[in-house]
Image (cartoon, grey):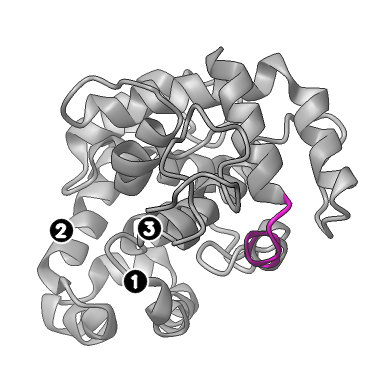
Amino acid sequence: MTVERIYGLVKRAAALPDVRAEVEVNHDDNRWWPLSITDTRMRMLAAGWSTRVSYRMVTTYARVIASANVRGFDDLLTATDAELTDLVAPIGLTRSRIDYLRSLAGLLQHWEKQSVSPASPSADCDALILDFARRVHGASFKVAQCALLNARGYHCGIIPVDSGMVSKLAPALGIVLPPGPVAHERFRHVLEAAVRARSADFRALAARHGQRVTIPEDAPPTWWVHLVLIYFKRLYLNGPSARLCSRRPLCTRIVDCAHPHV
């Protein structure tokens, strides 16, 4: 039933023009985690620094990340706190972002000593996310998921789960999650299992709606599903939208149905 509900929501959300537009803009080369950043360490840094940055600040965030990428990860580590403060000031939370950088460097050194590569598909994803969440300042599971996905590539099979997905999307699907940060990991496992169970069907949805995205033939469409869900959450659940059915998840139409709306 859970798989069917997730598939039903993705099917409906993917047909919405505003969701489709956001997915197409961000799928092949994501505005938050662009392919122009090739250093795995910088990609993990970008994932962490994107937290608590609003959508309307994506252009400002992109400038900060581009500037950081020009300097390079090693150069950032030798920078003073004052220099780093000047760099990240436009996106705020300067102390937290500096601490994230330095603790990320410490974790990467620890992994290197253990011959662990976060970008390797053979490395245990669950174990790395847990270790990342424990060791990196301000990370928790949701940031760790994003960092590992960004290190491994969009189509690695990870579906990162942010706070809004836990508090708004899961209830809309009738999914009960445990309290606390572990909810992000639990929901990630649920979503990833659903995509694996109906991988071909999810892939067909993107083609059916004519979405201009490139999904590798040998990869499950987890990245596409993630984007569909997170932009549906942003556009229809954060408000929530007046078009959203108040009887979800029992109503399979979800949006623009005949039931009374919120």
| Residue at 37 percent of width and 53 percent of height | 262
Please provide percent x and percent y for residue 238: 36, 58
Quick check: can you spot residue 109?
no
| Residue at 25 percent of width and 70 percent of height | 78
Locate the N terminus by quadrant: top right
Give the mark nearer the N terminus: 2 vs 1.
1
The answer to whether marks 2 and 3 mark residues whose Cβ atoms lie closer than 8 Å is no
Judged by its main secondary structure, the magenta piece is helix
Q: Is residue 150 magenta?
A: no
Asked where in the image residue 36 lies, by quadrant, the reply is: bottom right
What crowding class fits label 1: few (fewer than 14 Cα within 10 Å), some (14-19), or many (20 or more)? Answer: few
Horizontal arrangement in the rendering, residue 148 relative to residue 214 (left or right): left
Q: Which mark is residue 99?
A: 2
Please provide percent x and percent y for residue 22: 63, 65
Viewer-nearest of discs 2 and 1: 1
| Residue at 44 percent of width and 77 percent of height | 58
What crowding class fits label 2: few (fewer than 14 Cα within 10 Å), some (14-19), or many (20 or more)? Answer: some
Give the mark nearer the N terminus: 2 vs 3.
2
Quick check: can you spot residue 229?
yes
What crowding class fits label 3: few (fewer than 14 Cα within 10 Å), some (14-19), or many (20 or more)? Answer: some
- Distance Cα–Cα, label 1 vs label 3: 17 Å
Give the mark nearer the N terminus: 1 vs 3.
1
Regarding mark 2 in the picture, which secondary structure is present there?
helix
Please provide percent x and percent y for residue 132: 29, 34
Please provide percent x and percent y for residue 50: 36, 63
What residue would you read off at disc 1? 54
What residue would you read off at disc 3? 240
Q: Which residues are magenta?
A: 15-23
- Distance Cα–Cα, label 2 vs label 3: 34 Å
| Above/below status of 160 relative to 31 | above
Q: Amino acid at mark 2?
A: Asp
Q: Amino acid at mark 1?
A: Ser
